[in-house]
Image: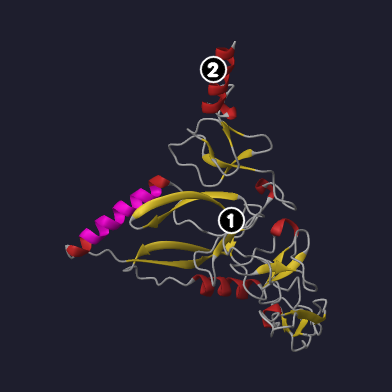
């Protein structure tokens, strides 16, 4: 009988619980689907995080928890055209539906299922008044909010993503819970092909060969069509911004928007950028004064011997009363 118990103990020691019933159980953030063996753990779903390769059916994904709070299935979301060039970074909002340009300082964000966008690194979608982050369905503004976004990439609100980057001349693939475009390649095969392509390009340059290509956009009807083509094409291409501005000008040439008085902000605040939804002409959210916490004085890191840091005045994060006041006493 002793040998039976000893054998059972050894079996439990060398076998993971997820394999006791002949089934590999995958945890949060692990690759699933496609040719991957096993299934996602309870309360996790295999969610595709990249387009399926033509030779891969079904596509691989990551074991992810249910939809983030305030999100709807991506099948019911109409995404604007993804931009290749952005003033900041590229992101996919926490619902994981629409690749887009990250919202910048002073720009509107959040809203129902994050329809108004997600903030760039080191910025937090914050309520217009107060010191709390904005979460769907509330609309907020991108700004510095002390105590939040300690990691400029990782965010527990965002889906798990898997991808690869080139480090020290090799492909490094891993998972990360992020809304930012943290990966240069969506598959190991794509990364390896690019490395081989770079080697081939370097060899061609050594041999004096050069292929000239340019990227830009054309205004075709009611949309901007962007492409990559030979530099020697007779018709010049437009930049994305130029094309979008021309399209917006043509769409809104006969539209008269209601006049809205622009407020004057206190010294501790700044004016947000009006928010105009994609495809519309008039602001849905006007310019609003909001606290600039980035300019608030920090608590003294140290005080003279015998003194301690005290908050002598608490402020509620409303323009005109934005910053707490500290003093050594």
Image quadrant occupied by the C terminus: bottom right
The disc at residue 229 is none
Q: Which residue is mark 1?
A: 178
Q: Is residue 195 magenta?
A: yes
**Lateral position of residue 319 relative to residue 1, left or right:** right
Q: Which residue is mark 2?
A: 7
Q: Is residue 111 magenta?
A: no
Q: CA distance from mark 1 to mark 2?
A: 44 Å
**Lateral position of residue 16 relative to residue 196, left or right:** right
Residue 322 seen in the current view: no
- The residue closer to the viewer here, 313 or 178, is 313
Residue in view at x 55 percent, y 30 percent:
38
Residue in view at x 74 percent, y 65 percent:
133
Q: Quadrant of residue 118?
A: bottom right
Point out residue 311 in the picture as x, y percentages from the top left corner: 79, 79
Question: Residue farthest to the front?
Answer: 306
The magenta region covers 190-203
Q: Quadrant of residue 205?
A: bottom left
Question: Residue farthest to the top?
Answer: 1
| Mark 2: secondary structure | helix
């Amino acid at each position: 009988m002793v040998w039976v118990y000893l054998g059972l103990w050894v079996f439990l020691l060398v076998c993971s619980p997820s394999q006791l019933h002949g089934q590999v159980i995958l945890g949060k953030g692990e690759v699933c689907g496609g040719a991957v063996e096993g299934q996602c753990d309870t309360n996790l779903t295999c969610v595709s995080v990249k387009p399926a390769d033509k030779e891969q059916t079904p596509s691989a994904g990551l074991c992810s928890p249910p939809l983030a709070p305030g999100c709807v299935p991506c099948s019911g979301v109409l995404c604007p055209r993804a931009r290749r060039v952005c003033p900041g970074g590229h992101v996919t909002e926490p619902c994981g539906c629409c690749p887009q340009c990250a919202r910048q300082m002073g720009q509107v964000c959040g809203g129902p299922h994050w329809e108004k966008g997600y903030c760039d690194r080191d910025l937090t979608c914050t309520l217009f008044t107060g010191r709390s982050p904005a979460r769907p369905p509330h609309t907020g503004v991108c700004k510095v909010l002390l105590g939040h976004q300690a990691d400029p990439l990782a965010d527990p609100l965002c889906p798990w993503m898997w991808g690869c980057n080139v480090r020290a001349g090799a492909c490094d693939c891993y998972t990360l819970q992020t809304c930012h475009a943290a990966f240069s390649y969506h598959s190991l095969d794509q990364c390896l092909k690019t490395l081989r392509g770079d080697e081939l390009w370097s060899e061609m340059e050594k041999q004096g060969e050069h292929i000239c290509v340019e990227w830009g956009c054309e205004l075709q009807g009611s949309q901007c069509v962007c492409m990559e083509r030979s530099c020697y094409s007779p018709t010049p291409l437009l930049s994305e911004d130029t094309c979008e501005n021309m399209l917006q000008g043509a769409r809104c040439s006969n539209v008269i928007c209601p006049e809205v008085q622009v407020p004057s902000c206190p010294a501790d605040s700044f004016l947000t950028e009006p928010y105009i939804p994609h495809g519309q002409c008039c602001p849905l959210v006007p310019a609003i004064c909001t606290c600039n916490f980035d300019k608030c004085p920090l608590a003294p890191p140290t005080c003279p011997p015998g003194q301690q840091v005290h908050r002598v005045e608490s402020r509620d994060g409303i323009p005109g009363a934005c910053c707490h006041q500290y003093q050594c006493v």
